[in-house]
Amino acid sequence: MNIKRLLPITAFAFAIGAVFFTARMEAQPDTIKQMAPGVWFRQGDIDGKGHCNNVIIEMKDYLVVIDANFPDGARLTMADAAKVSKKPIKWVFDTHHHGDHAYANAVWTKAGAKTFAYVGVAQEMKRYEPSRWKGANRKDVSDLNLPTAEPPQQTFDKSPFVLDDGSRRIEFHHFGWAHTRGDGFAYLPKEQILCTGDAVTNGPYNFMGDGRVANWPNVVANALKLKVKQVLPGHGGPGGVEVLKGEQTFMRELYAGVSKLKKAGKSADDLTKMGMDKSLEGALGLSATSKNWVGKSLAQQAVVTYEEIAAGKPHGEIAGGK
Ligand SMILES: [Zn+2]
């Protein structure tokens, strides 16, 4: 690609979109940052290695890690955790069943940690595994030499599940089906920090195939009932409550925009074509608030939404059955 030709366009986009690109500019893959005393955010390298973000939370005698990651992401997180605290990692929380968040479960349990999740995560694994595990096509996964993904060792079905050792309280919530049927959030009420997994990402990272698009804004609305100062997403940089509101707005507008285009007679193929000729974003009527969530997957996201509306059931049921 000709970089020189791209530059003026990029500069222009930058100028008009500066405020919306702030979050993405702060993307610092493979770095760890303290967000509050005893709380660290590790930004995974999604573009280069497909990793998710991790959060390391210090309790009185042990550490809690949010998300298992892929195996090589887990090892990087373990090494960083050892740099910030000598305490052992006792709990690892899978925010959902996807490989970049849960395929290293076996790495953590081998190291002595206990993996846990909302019960929906284990159920999603039953729906989609071992087929996705076998098709993962990643050396760090095949090197584990396991026939399938290791499910979380412990699950909870009453939300929230709480860890409180007197030094800190962490609540693990399930607010309904957005990104997957197992979506879990970790909330620190004193620090007002919310770890969202992929139910809320900060940037164009919404994978929606296992999702329920129509319900997504409702799940975010439930999260918005909490007092939140900092949002630590599954992908993208950390942010404030505007990340929750932006994700919600994007999902609402995407759904409304696709509904409108469908009523106007457009097909799913038309949406794909409009993605290619770049007319889709305008046709969907996405507002400036949604820009941070718009990227190269927009057409795919629109098609998923279209299929959900056309089938009259959550897209995750089209993908994985009841
Ligand atoms: Zn995911």
Image (tube, rainbow, N blue to C red):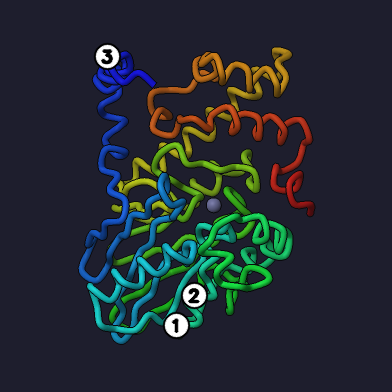
Q: Sequence order check: which comes first, mark 2 or mark 3? A: 3
Could you tell me which residue is drawn at 68 percent across and 29 percent down? 306
Quadrant containing the C terminus is bottom right
Residue 238 higher or lower than 64, as above or below: above
Q: Quadrant of residue 135?
A: bottom right
Q: CA distance from mark 3 to mark 1?
A: 50 Å
Q: In the rendered image, which quarter is residue 56 located in? A: bottom left
**Residue 283 in view (yes/no):** no
> Can you tell which mark lies on residue 8?
3
Q: Quick check: 177 left or right of 285?
A: right
User: Is 48 on the left or on the right of 79, as rendered?
Assistant: right
Report the residue marked by disc 2.
Answer: 107
Q: Are marks 1 and 2 in contact (CB under 8 Å)?
A: yes
- For residue 68, side relative to residue 6 (left or right): right
Location of residue 304 in the rendering, given as x and y in whole percent from the top left corner: 66, 35
Q: Amino acid at mark 2?
A: Val
Instruction: Tell me the kind of residue under disc 3.
Output: Pro
Kindly identify the residue that appears in the image at 77 percent across and 36 percent down: 312
Give yes or no for contact between labels 2 and 3 (Cβ–Cβ under 8 Å).
no
* Within-10-Å neighbours for mark 2: few <14, some 14–19, many 20+: some
Residue receiving disc 1: 111
Q: Position of residue 141 (x, y in %)?
A: 55, 64
Earlier in the chain: of badge 3 and badge 1, it is 3
